[in-house]
Amino acid sequence: MNNSDLADAVAASSGIAKTDARKLVDAVFDAIGNAAAKGEEVSLNGFGKFKVKDSPEREGRNPATGEAMTIKASKKLAFAPAKAIKDKLNG
């Protein structure tokens, strides 16, 4: 499912125009992205949590040359599903 498919599903279930649904879907993802950029956790009841995790600097290897190199520290966005979603996935 992509953004357009999600917007179509929202439009069908709520009875709004597809263009309005697409704006809503885009606004939700934009809000989640902005909150994550600030380092905030986004908790959606019954769905799950998005939180920013720090990945420390570490040693790695260049796959082309085999040369040792340092991989910079970075931030990652992690998702942890709520129990209701886990239950749907596992029957």
Image (cartoon, rainbow, N blue to C red):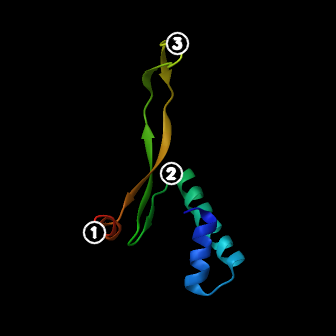
Say few, some or many: other residues with alpha carbon within 10 Å of mark 2 (under 14 / 14 to 19 / 20 or more). Answer: some
Disc 3 packing (10 Å; few <14; some 14–19; many ≥20)? few
Residue positioned 61% across, 74% down in the render: 8
From this viewpoint, which residue is outermost toward the right? 19
Is residue 63 or residue 28 the one in the foreground?
63
Q: Going from the N terminus, do you reach mark 2 or mark 3 first?
A: 2
Ranked by sequence position, the earlier of labels 1 and 2 is 2
Please say if the residues under marks 1 and 2 sit with CB atoms less than 8 Å apart. no
Residue 59's place in the image compared with 20, above or below, is above
Front residue of this view, candidates 85 and 32: 85
Report the amino acid beneath label 3.
Thr
Q: Circle 1 sits on which residue?
A: 91
Tell me the element at label 2: loop
Query: Which quadrant of the view contains residue 26?
Result: bottom right
Would you name the residue on which mark 2 appears? 39
- Look at the image and tell me in which quarter the C terminus lies: bottom left
Give the residue type at disc 2.
Gly
x, y percent for residue 85: 35, 67
| Residue bearing mark 3 | 65
Q: Which residue is at 44% across, 21% downward?
A: 60
N-term mark: 3 or 1: 3
Image x and y of residue 74, in percent? 50, 36
Q: Residues within 10 Å of mark 1 (few under 14, many from 20)?
A: few
Question: Which amino acid is tagged 1?
Answer: Gly
Q: Which callout, 1 or 2, points to the residue nearer the camera? A: 1
Find the distance from the CA under tag 3 to the CA under tag 1: 46 Å
Can you tell which of label 3 and label 1 is closer to the viewer? 1
